Image (spheres, rainbow, N blue to C red):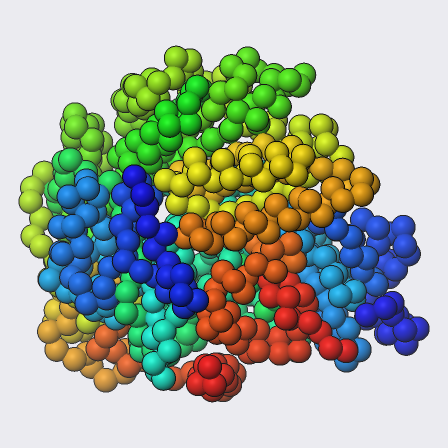
Amino acid sequence: MHGLTSRQSAALQAAMPSGRLLQAKSQLAAYDSDGLGYKHFPPDAVAIPGNAGEVRALVRCLGDLRIPFVARGAGTSLSGGPVAAQGGVIIHLSRLAAIEEINQDDAYAVVESGVVLNHLDDALKALGLYYPPDPSTGPVCTLGGNVASNSGGVHCFRYGVTGNYVLGVEAVLLDGSVVQFGGPAGGRGAWREDWKRLFVGSEGTLGIFTRLWLRLIPRPEKVWTFRATYRELEQASEAIRQLARHPSYPAAIEFMDPRCVDMVENSPLKVGLPKGSFMLLTEIDGPPELVDGRVASIAAILRDCGSTDVSYSDAERERMGLWKARKAQGGLLGQVSPDFIVQDAVIPKARLGEMLEFIYQQADEAGVAAVTIMHAGDGNLHPNFLFDGTKHGDLERVELIGKALMKKVSEMGGTLSGEHGIGNDKSAYVAEHFGPLGQAIQLKIPLLFNPDNRLNPLKVFPERRFAA
Amino acid sequence: MIIDPGIATDGSRLFTPFFDEIDMIGSFDAGMTLGEVNRLAGEHGLCFPLVLDPDASIAAHMAAAEFAPASARFGAYVDNLPGMNWELPEGQRMRLGERVVKSTTGYDLFRFLLHSGGRYGRATEYVLRLRPASAEILTGKFEGETLPAVVRAISRSSWSHWIDRIEWVTNGAASHLEISAGVLPGESHIFEEYLAAIAKTSGSSWRSTECPPLPGLPSWTIKCLPSGAASLAIECATATGGTARALPTAGVVLVYPERAAAPGFIDALRHRVEKVGGHLFGQHFPPRNPHDEEARWTTRLEDEWKKL
């Protein structure tokens, strides 16, 4: 697409309530990238429907006009997912923000897809209920976006990812029809096949979520947070191994490499970690009478693996202090570097040392700074590469590292994305990861729901191009 | 230690045999029994907790049920099997899913096909997520007239995260709750005190005792609302002269019929659970016929995969 025709523009204006179709360049600027930041894809227009009915009408109108479109929540994706890679219209869903029901007897919530994750969490706290997926963008990211990219977060190791909590989805399909897969009971409903499973993590390429049924669990009454540092990677790795196998099932096991620790300690947000150390942070939770008795054994693991500075607490303020370095690193990346790429891969944990060495070698050779964090319990690695997009060749160097990294991840038996999705950032590596037959069978899925790739083209698979 | 990537490098990208003690994950032949899996895993202090019948193969489990009693704590099979090698009806083999426990790479064909009943092919190998084996297992029973109060108390506290099995067992006429929890050394008394307190406040009785082994693979299972699971179990046991086991925290009923239910019973049941987004499933149970819209998708899918 190269801009809307006057006929298309007028038809869209007529289809949308007044003021909810944005077409001015200054208005569209906010929508030309996602959390990835450094790639820009200006849409031709942004439509802001207020309810599922308006989404349906808009999708029908876009069908009549043969315009590609992309669903978008808060735009916090880190994979280049909710951007108009082939132009067209962005459907911004943040007005679908109603928490429609919280059912305590059957432990589920019904929400519109534009509900902000932390708004749901706030509503659940008072009821002693818990929705565990917790990507770091919780204060702004929307649940529809979380389901579309099967988001994770720091507590996935024990609690699982978004997909583990999706009981049902309501989606608007390409022709404007509405389907409901699953529902409060979390099964298939009146369908023979489990279509819901294909829609979770489909990155907006099969339909637009308008309503979600989400499973809830009792909120853990007590949480203990532990932090430790290690001089050697082998010590940290052994602690990760022992924690992951401990029957107290830590909810989180987080890792920061020495370069990341140094970045924090060289900043005003320093917390007193030894420079050059590997940091581990872990949490256990549950009923107080159970979890309190497990504190000593977790602290012992951390100490016995070689840490001399194990700290732990169950007090909210102290716990947040222990988390500070881990939470601060994301914001610091933006302060110390004009641009950065957060990569997302899952590797067998036994290969962590080899992978870190590979990252350092690639980054050092290219003259690019790299700091790495990891959801260590499940091997979900986030190397962050810092660069300056205005400097000639910087972005190309980082993209070459990304390519080498993804190849290495696949060779190790890992996967390209654990929680961010593929978007258009990693779509170039998908073919090699799946192999020819695996790729071919994957590409049959959009044929069922999105045969001409008008819905979120050029995402996940680069072959998915809309031919106007 | 050298960890096998577990994925073929010949372009097929199939899973190859591997066992990764650190990631607690391994690949197993579809014909291997879960008893055999657990013997192997046990040598490394690990286990696969979702067992219905230790003498039944992994493939037989996937054909019979989507949940096992330990799903109360560990979730459905789809959340504990990260991948499989899949053979299409025409014989082509491919990998679905991953050998790591977390992935959002491409469409989730693995979960779509895992319980698809042979309609699109079959699994030849499965990748199983294993868990630390508990040194000690606490088992016992709740009995009495106030079992719903026991279920409500447990399901509303984070104690429910730590109880492997909470099963409402019924033959239609009488019911009791069976409880099983893996405990750390020295923790048994904490669980015992909690369960005894629940019994006291709910007016039921609790005793620590061995629970009999499961009756094997269920003939059919129901995915339903948690609050309706126990009453559905009673209804199904009564209608079939058999037994049923409800997982009231997960909204699942496993049914072991002794005779066919009266005409119309299954259709009425199916209608009720589908209305709330549930379904009926089982190896001895005919899958529902797809309606027109779904038939368009399934036919296209079959046709497209035939072209591969």
Q: Nearer the viewer, residue B282 or A296?
A: A296
Residue placed at 31% from the left, 74% from the top? B122
Q: Is residue A327 left or right of residue B174?
A: right
Can I make out residue B166 in this image? Answer: no
Above-or-below relation of A320 to A337: above
Quarter of the rendering containing residue A359: top right
Quarter of the rendering containing residue B137: top left
Q: In the rendering, at what x and y percent does residue A139 appear?
A: 63, 38
Q: In this view, does B63 lie to the left or right of A22?
A: left
Quarter of the rendering containing residue A48: bottom right
Residue placed at 71% from the left, 28% from the top? A336
Above-or-below relation of B271 to B90: above
Which quarter of the rendered picture does the N terminus of chain A lie within? bottom right
Which quarter of the rendered picture does the C terminus of chain A lie within? bottom right
Q: In the rendering, at what x and y percent does residue B136 appear?
A: 14, 36
Q: Is residue A414 left or right of residue B240?
A: right
Q: In the rendering, at what x and y percent does residue A89 appear?
A: 78, 64
Q: Which of B229 and A278 is in front in this view?
A: A278
Can I make out residue A369 in this image? Answer: yes
Residue placed at 28% from the left, 27% from the top? A290
Residue placed at 86% from the left, 74% from the top? A8
Above-or-below relation of B133 to A87: above
Above-or-below relation of B90 to A151: below
Q: In this view, does B67 lie to the left or right of A105?
A: left
Q: Single out the residue that lies furthest toward the front.
A: A365
Q: In the rendering, at what x and y percent does residue B117 appear?
A: 31, 76
The total number of labels drawn is 0
Q: Single out the residue that lies furthest toward the right.
A: A6
Q: Which of A87 and A67 is in front in this view?
A: A87
